[in-house]
Image: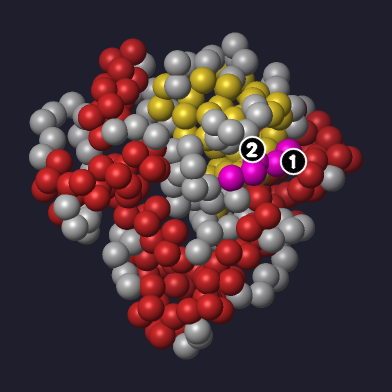
Amino acid sequence: MPRPPLAGLIDDLYYLEGAPPYARLTLPPAPSALLIVNLGAPFRIRAGADIETAEYADGCVVTMRTRPLEFGYPLRTRSVGVHVKPWGLAPFLPMPAAELCDRPVTMEQVWGRSAVAELRDRLATAVGPHEMLTLLEDELMRRLRETTGLSLVRHTSDVLVATRGKAAIGDLSVAAGVSSTHLAQRFKQLTGVTPKRLARTYRITAAVFAIDPSGPIDWGDLAGRAGYFDQAHFGHEFREFTGLTPTRYVEVRQRFLREHPGHVLDGWPLPAD
């Protein structure tokens, strides 16, 4: 668990090393952001069918996204990273998060070449994963800065978390004592998306994680409990966020479970091969 005040910004820090389960993994949108410091061979990211695949040697920063990302991995990968809350990258970015929505950038573009090179050298020579994660946490603490509007976005997002995205956006702005326009502007600036989009992401993510691919699924009941008007609406939303139909999603999850039981990456990334 990260120490305060990072605990209010990030979910966890992680170390990843070894052969990936698949050469390509699809990462659907989720109510989170991502910071990766790469310590191995470059990896590649494709941020949409209409966007060229880009290579990332020093790592990447990924803000809240609205479309699936496809990660292409080398034969072996090694990195340290941070799973960040939707608003959590804002205090570490030199630009508004809206500028990075669905546009992953390199670590160099965010923190500068010399600073990232120094950090990567320190991480590469650290004694074990624990020291590496401590170094990364220290770097985040050092770079932490005051961010206007962060408390507004965080407290409003807490309501979305508690309601699994079902809270009415109009009610949120009233409760916060600001206009809906002001709230949307702050969200775009600090998360990259509007509160309505974040609410949709929380809702579909909660529904997806309620799926047990090992047993029978009552899609109508699942859609209703997630707050969707009908199964057709749920199916449309599901395809928009994951790129797959609900049935196809279950087939892909079952493949992952069958071929790599208990793998650390099972749950959200999906085989793209």
Q: Position of residue 128 (x, y in %)?
A: 64, 28
Residue bearing the label numbered 2: 36
Q: Is residue 86 magenta?
A: no
Q: In the visual, does 198 lie left or right of 168?
A: right
Which residue is painted at 47% across and 88% down in the image? 177
Q: Please tell me whether mark 1 sits on a helix, a strand or a loop.
A: helix
Q: Magenta residues, as a range? A: 102-107
Which residue is painted at 72% across and 66% down in the image? 145
Which residue is painted at 76% across and 48% down in the image? 110
Q: Please tell me whether mark 2 sits on a helix, a strand or a loop.
A: strand
Q: In the visual, does 250 lie left or right of 191?
A: left
Residue bearing the label numbered 1: 107
Q: In the visual, does 174 lie left or right of 221?
A: right
Give residue 150's quadrant in the image.
bottom right
In the image, what residue type sits under mark 2? Answer: Ile
Outermost residue, right side:
114
Sequence-wise first label, 1 or 2? 2
Check disc 2: other Cα within 10 Å, few if <14, some if 14-19, many if 20+.
many
Check disc 1: other Cα within 10 Å, few if <14, some if 14-19, many if 20+.
many
Give residue 209's quadrant in the image.
top left
Q: Position of residue 238 (x, y in %)?
A: 32, 42
Q: In the visual, does 86 lie left or right of 144?
A: left
Question: Camera-side residue: 60 or 39?
Answer: 60
Are the residues tagged 1 and 2 within 8 Å (C-beta)?
yes
Q: Quadrant of the C terminus?
A: top left
Above or below, comparing residue 79 to residue 191 in the picture: above
Q: Position of residue 9 (x, y in %)?
A: 56, 59
The span from disc 1 to disc 2 (Cα, nearest Å) is 8 Å
Above or below, comparing residue 37 to residue 4 in the picture: above
